[in-house]
Image (spheres, grey):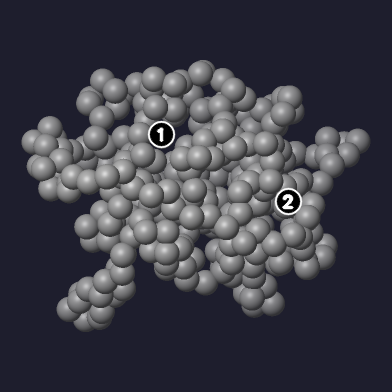
Amino acid sequence: MSSLVQRSSGLVQRRTEASRNAADKDRPDGEEDEEPRRGDEPDDDDTGDSKETRLTLMEEVLLLGLKDREGYTSFWNDCISSGLRGCMLIELALRGRLQLEACGMRRKGLLARKVICKSDAPTGDVLLDEALKHIKDTQPPETVQSWIELLSGETWNPLKLHYQLRNVRERLAKNLVEKGVLTTEKQNFLLFDMTTHPLTNNNIKQRLIKKVQESVLEKWVNDPHRMEKRLLALIFLAHSSDVLENAFAPLLDDQYDLAMKRVRTLLELEPEGESLKANANELLWSVVAAFTK
């Protein structure tokens, strides 16, 4: 469970102005990209930027973590695996498939409450449907923290190893290939060959990065409950997956400092209290609690 509680605090080296200019020169000019396809829109009303965002939370977090030219995530990142499982739980909650059990008379804490299947209707996403089936078929129900561990394969119980979702990063990358965001290549690393997925549609990734940057700069509202739930979840899970600073790398120093200060403001929130506020998604805050406790 070390990947849940240990988060790398090392700063991602920001690009210099010269390297940014070089990157701009290398970027081909062309018409605006087509929006990627998506088989299932969120089932709740949380669709504020649905015309621009056609990626799941898992795909967005992976895209932030992928090296553009190399096409793979950092070998030193041991947080993204559990972070992607947290994304799945929140994605299913935002689509109206999952919820937390009632807190009861004794007011159970978020991490003690079980995850309940609210609807088993297919989402159109194979990974989400696989996770949903596990949760629906499991009795007695498990907590959010347990599901993050089980779906990641972080369990010593051999009877529960079948819950692990395998090859998640590769499967998400293939989804992004189908949506025209990435491509597929083979790279030789002396002792072995590895399938990589370099970026082909820079516009979509830049739009994602811009959205994350603006959420804590120009469009900062200083109240998580006034933020779109999907965007709020993206900030939390990108941080838990140790990829958030990649989105802040191009910022100038003063912008970077301000962005990180506001992210810390979000990380210092108390999930238990925030989950009690009007229109809060309890499962979202439960996932946040699992990563920030």
Q: Quick one: quadrant of the C terminus?
A: top right
Q: Write the residue at 54% across / 40% down.
A: 50
In-front residue for pair 195/238: 195
Q: First in sequence, mark 2 or 1: give its number.
A: 2
Q: Is residue 26 left or right of residue 139?
A: left
**Residue labelled with disc 2:** 98
Instruction: Please determine whether, in this image, residue 273 is positioned above or below residue 41.
Output: above
Q: Position of residue 241 (x, y in %)?
A: 44, 49
Judged from the image, the secondary structure of the residue bearing numbered disc 2 is strand
Judged from the image, the secondary structure of the residue bearing numbered disc 1 is helix
Q: Write the residue at 42% across / 59% down.
A: 179
**Residue labelled with disc 1:** 211
Q: Residues within 10 Å of mark 1 (few under 14, many from 20)?
A: some
Instruction: Count numbered badges in the picture.
Output: 2
Q: Position of residue 16 (x, y in %)?
A: 13, 35
Q: Is residue 262 left or right of residue 56?
A: left
Q: Amino acid at mark 1?
A: Lys
Q: Amino acid at mark 2?
A: Leu
Report whether residue 58 is seen: no
Instruction: Please determine whether, in this image, residue 8 is positioned above or below residue 3.
Output: above
Structural distance between the alpha carbons of marks 2 and 1: 26 Å
**Do labels 2 and 1 touch, CB within 8 Å?**
no
Report whether residue 33 is seen: yes
Q: Quick one: quadrant of the N terminus?
A: bottom right
Q: Is residue 164 left or right of residue 15?
A: right
Q: Can you tell which of label 2 and label 1 is closer to the viewer?
A: 1
Q: Residues within 10 Å of mark 2 (few under 14, many from 20)?
A: many
Q: Write the residue at 61% across / 49% down.
A: 41
Q: Position of residue 55 (x, y in %)?
A: 48, 50
In-front residue for pair 163/204: 204
**Residue that protrudes farthest toward the right in the picture:** 105
